[in-house]
Structure formats: structure tokens, C-alpha cells
């Protein structure tokens, strides 16, 4: 693999940053479990959780295609879209100020990466 480690590393660092944000907010709000009705903590928990729900599938698809020696341009497109999408979505979700445009753009980029990666995997299996 030549491309996947870059994006896997970036996603790993961002995941830890989101976890640290949740931990810091829990500590300052003195809430050990759940969100305790704290809207900021709830938003940060969901930003972290949503990242954990989408990022793994996206990077697995990039990794599979990397192992199949698919074009590095396509791999970088998928990786950049995935990382940018997850960052935009987390940024929009983890703040009290609602940023719907960033959230929508983040989901569109993420779903584009996962969707294109999935289709390319299926096309490879079909021999196309």
C-alpha cells in the first residue's frame, strides 16, 4: 500500500482529537456518562460517534483499492474526499453554533468517497 497509510494516519489523528474534545468537555461539565442534558457535550459525542461510524468503511475501501493497484489519482481523490468530509462534518457538529452548510458538504464528500470506492470495487470484481 502506498496511499492508504497517509489517510489512515490523518483519520487516526482526527479521531483522537475528537475523543480529546469529548473528554475535555466531560471534564469541564463534570459529566462522566451520557451527556447529562449538556447540548455541547451531546454534539461532541455525536461528532466523535459519527466519525467512528463512517471513517472505517471509507478507509477500508481506499485500502482495498490500494492493494488492487488502482490509480493513485483515484486513491488520493477518495482519501481527500473522506478526510475533508469527516473534518467538515465533525467541525459542524461539534460546535454549539449550527453550521448546516459544512455538515451537508461533509456528508456529501464522505458519501461520495464511500460510494465511488464501493462502485470501483464492484467494477473490479466484475472485471470491468
Image (cartoon, rainbow, N blue to C red):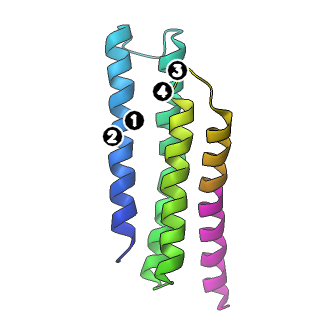
User: Residue at image x 44%, y 70%?
Assistant: 63
The majority secondary structure of the magenta stretch comes to: helix
Q: Are marks 4 and 1 in contact (CB under 8 Å)?
A: yes
| Sequence-first tag of 1 and 3 | 1
Could you say whether the residue bearing mark 3 is in a helix, strand or loop? helix
List the residue tagged with mark 1.
18
Q: Residue tagged by mark 3?
A: 42
The range drawn in magenta is: 111-128
Is mark 4 in CB contact (under 8 Å) with mark 3? yes
Residue 44 tag number: 4
Of residue 81 and residue 115, the one placed in the foreground of this image is: 81
* Image point (32%, 47%), residue name: 13
Mark 2 highlights which residue?
16
Q: Do residues under tags 2 and 1 come within 8 Å of each other at their CB atoms?
A: yes
Callout 1 secondary element: helix
Q: CA distance from mark 2 to mark 1?
A: 5 Å
User: Looking at the picture, how far across and down is residue 89, in whole percent?
Assistant: 56, 41
Q: Quadrant of residue 123?
A: bottom right
Q: Secondary structure at mark 2?
A: helix
Mark 2 is surrounded, within 10 Å at the Cα level, by few (under 14), some (14 to 19) or many (20 or more) other residues, namely few
Q: Is label 2 in contact with label 4 (beta carbons under 8 Å)?
A: no
Residue 126 lies in the magenta-colored region: yes
Identity of the residue drawn at 65% across and 78% down: 122
Q: Where residue 115 sits: x, y (%)?
A: 66, 64
In this rendering, position of residue 114 left or right of residue 44 = right
Judged left or right of residue 104, residue 72 is left
Instruction: Specify whether residue 103 is painted magenta.
Output: no
For label 4, the crowd category at 10 Å Cα-Cα, with few meaning under 14, some 14 to 19 and many 20 or more, is many
Q: Work out whether 1 lies above or below 41.
A: below
Amino acid at each position: 500500500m502506498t496511499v492508504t497509510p497517509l489517510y489512515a494516519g490523518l483519520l487516526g489523528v482526527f479521531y483522537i482529537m475528537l475523543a480529546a474534545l469529548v473528554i475535555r468537555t466531560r471534564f469541564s461539565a463534570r459529566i462522566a456518562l451520557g451527556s447529562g442534558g449538556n447540548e455541547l457535550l451531546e454534539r461532541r459525542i455525536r461528532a466523535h460517534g459519527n466519525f467512528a461510524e463512517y471513517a472505517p468503511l471509507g478507509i477500508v475501501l481506499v485500502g482495498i483499492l490500494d492493494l488492487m493497484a488502482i490509480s493513485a489519482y483515484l486513491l488520493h481523490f477518495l482519501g481527500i474526499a473522506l478526510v475533508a468530509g469527516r473534518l467538515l462534518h465533525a467541525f459542524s457538529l461539534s460546535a454549539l453554533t449550527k453550521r448546516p452548510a459544512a455538515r451537508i458538504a461533509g456528508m456529501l464528500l464522505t458519501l461520495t468517497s464511500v460510494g465511488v470506492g464501493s462502485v470501483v470495487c464492484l467494477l473490479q470484481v466484475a472485471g470491468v
